[in-house]
Amino acid sequence: MSKKNPSGSAPILRSTAEFARHVGLARTTVSRVLNGQPGLKQKTIERVQRALAETGFTPNAHALHLKGKRTQMVGICMEDLLTPPAVKKLAALQQALRKRGFSSLIEVFTPGMGREVVRHFLSMRVEAVVFIGHFHQEEIEARILELMAHGTPHLVIDQFGLKNANTISLDRAVAMEAVMNHLLDLGHRSFGLLGITRAPTSRHDRLTGIHATLKARGLDFDACTLTLDHLHERNNDFDYGRKLAASFLAQSRRPTALLALNDAIAIGALRGLHEADLKLPRDLSVVGFNNQEVAAMTTPTLTTVDQNIAGTIETAAEVLLSQLGAPPRAKPIIRLIEPALVVRESTGPARA
Amino acid sequence: MSKKNPSGSAPILRSTAEFARHVGLARTTVSRVLNGQPGLKQKTIERVQRALAETGFTPNAHALHLKGKRTQMVGICMEDLLTPPAVKKLAALQQALRKRGFSSLIEVFTPGMGREVVRHFLSMRVEAVVFIGHFHQEEIEARILELMAHGTPHLVIDQFGLKNANTISLDRAVAMEAVMNHLLDLGHRSFGLLGITRAPTSRHDRLTGIHATLKARGLDFDACTLTLDHLHERNNDFDYGRKLAASFLAQSRRPTALLALNDAIAIGALRGLHEADLKLPRDLSVVGFNNQEVAAMTTPTLTTVDQNIAGTIETAAEVLLSQLGAPPRAKPIIRLIEPALVVRESTGPARA
DNA sequence: GCGTTTAAGGGACACGTGTCCGCGTCAAGA
DNA sequence: TCTTGACGCGGACACGTGTCCCTTAAACGC
């Protein structure tokens, strides 16, 4: 078998050497054209360009990197690819990185697999690693230490309170302050919390914001809020919200407003209340969190908190790229993102 | 500056040579340990393993590939990362490939950028390329030709009717047959089509299925169906469905069932009908498409078509990997996926 | 036709890796 | 003490690339 393709179609060119042979030039000459070096006849340059377009030859990126070229790759660890806000962040980040000339290597970081994922990124010599989501604290902290030991910059989006981690997070306390002020202004004084029970790990957590707002208005947290999270298996989804709403209605001391951990729970609550023949927001107000697309499609449409994902990711890209050339920092970078309350139909004046 | 790290922490090891020096062994010895070659003392092996665990050293994947090791990478072209079914497919595919030892290089294929994306994949020497979504036909066909010229296998998920392309698609005709039979059995004879107007490009398109079912029952397509797509700007989203529903209500000859292109339109229609004080499914039936999570969260819950994404992707992974070692095929691989009708509350007997 | 300039040819090296092979070393057994 | 393995060392090469540098050939001016 000769190197020539018997079918007459172009042969598969896997190296500049083969490509140069195909064009009828020396490998070095082709290389000079590809890298825009001077001292070449225009005619030669065009000859190479034309062959390049015809054959679609691409230099081996791995060999380029071996010669010292940057990989221009960023590793992205996702908690999963099913949570809509996380996917939106991924989409935005991928686009932001692409715009800056980086490509994204995406892996789902299942519990216990963190080591393999990060090792894989390191073996690919990515220039940085981003974590999106919420991970097992010890595991992610160990991974971050490993990255730092290799001099690879990192960034954690959405998980606050990690030791020595560069972090970008939504200020959930500020979000809940906005929600609470909105409801307090509407006359509400009794609140049901759906899924919002995790003990605050920082001063930017939801409960912190709720506490602070009530205190500022001279109200007592325990007297004003009610939690029934223990009554049902906690899935933080539609069904969970639906069951919780029903449970709240069965209480003698019924809150006038429900605050949900996320939009799915809130929409479940809307359903639960609808099934009990309540009219919203006349009988009860409901607030979600995340401002997913569905929040504008429910009946009634859902008042919720927008995460400002575009802003988050723009900041993330900046923070990430600012680390690239720079020497490692002593102190981690911490950035907070301001959320925005989106008022829709599911909240209204408290019933007298 | 010496090579030793003055801070006392472990130095950054970027090659087996540096790592071997750090362990106090020859590079070749370390290499033999890493590749499990025989003729090594157990003690030496353990020494290397321990240092490996301590330093987290990883061999340079690019150099490995240069030496002939497979890249174990698959390129995935996405139309966008915002369409929920497309993202679900991506998530499932990423997981299926990971399970088989492949990692995923994901790029969004914006119109006109296809060439760059595919060139990038080729320069990374990916072992295969997958397209998920719906692309400009000429552009994707050109890209597929380019891939074939390079001997790189490909697979298109969800876009039917491409020349010489390996394709996996949902049989939308079968889907619509199931929908139509369900509705016909409920007594419906007059159907509104929301967004379903594109001329069929193959015998597996929706309109083909609708036509076929009506014909089999001895009914006339034009007499039974009504389309008002031209009345509104076509975004195929919630608002589009909402407006369309209102328009159908304004017709003198009002259909008893509405068939939507996707769930978003269907949910918009639910809203539009609710605003007109219609009760579903008493007054009207509505069917969506895709079986997104939201379809179970609406009021009433939505009858829709499930794409069987798990099955699609499992097939995709098989088809993809079967191409890897094999010689190129003369005929493209075409696979059809069977959809499943999911009946919920939004469909019921036709009003007399 | 001759000398000079210009451009392509081609050998060499480095990058990090796996692998082959010959050489040195050390310890155990005779 | 000598022989014999067993095992680690280190040089060499290849993979595909960019770049340096020297050589060769063609083109050009006179």
Image (cartoon, coloured by chain):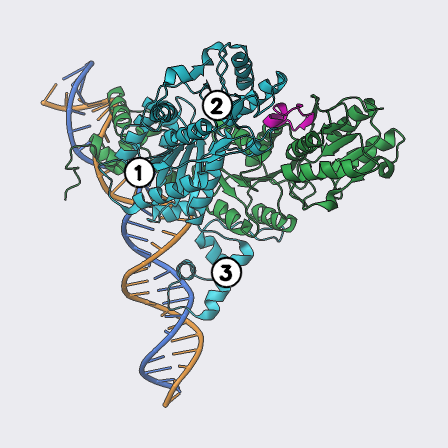
Chain colours: A cyan, B green, C blue, D orange
In x, y percent, where is residue A324? Answer: 31, 44
Above or below, comparing residue A93 to residue B343 in the picture: below
In the image, are marks 1 and 3 on the same chain?
yes
Residue topped by disc 1: A152
Q: Amino acid at mark 1?
A: Thr
Mark nearest the camera among 2 and 1 is: 2
Dot 2 surroundings within 10 Å: few (below 14), some, or many (20 or more)?
Answer: many
Real-space Cα separation, disc 2 to disc 1, in angstroms = 38 Å
Let me know if marks 3 and 2 both belong to one chain.
Answer: yes
Q: Is residue A338 above or below residue A33?
A: above
Q: Nearer the viewer, residue C8 or B124?
A: B124
- Give whichever of A64, B255 is nearer the camera: B255
Q: Earlier in the sequence, mark 3 or mark 2?
A: 3
Distance from disc 3 to disc 2, alpha carbons, whole Å, reads 66 Å
Depth check: give the residue in front, A237 or A50. Answer: A237
Q: Which chain is home to disc 3?
A: A
* Amino acid at the residue labelled 3: Val
> At which x and y percent is residue C17?
34, 37
Residue occupied by mark 2? A260
Q: Is residue A76 left or right of residue A323?
A: right
SS under mark 1: loop
- Is there any visible trace of residue A246 in the rendered image? yes
Q: Which residue is mark 3?
A: A23
Amino acid type of the residue tagged 2 in the rendering: Ala
Residue at mark 1 to residue at mark 3: CA–CA distance: 41 Å
Query: In the figure, residue A199 lies in which quadrant?
Result: top left
Judged by depth in the image, the label closer to the viewer, 3 or 2, is 2
The dot on residue A63 is: none
* Subunit of label 1: A
Please provide the residue range marked out in magenta: B293-311
**Which numbered disc, 2 or 1, marks the residue that appears first in the sequence?**
1
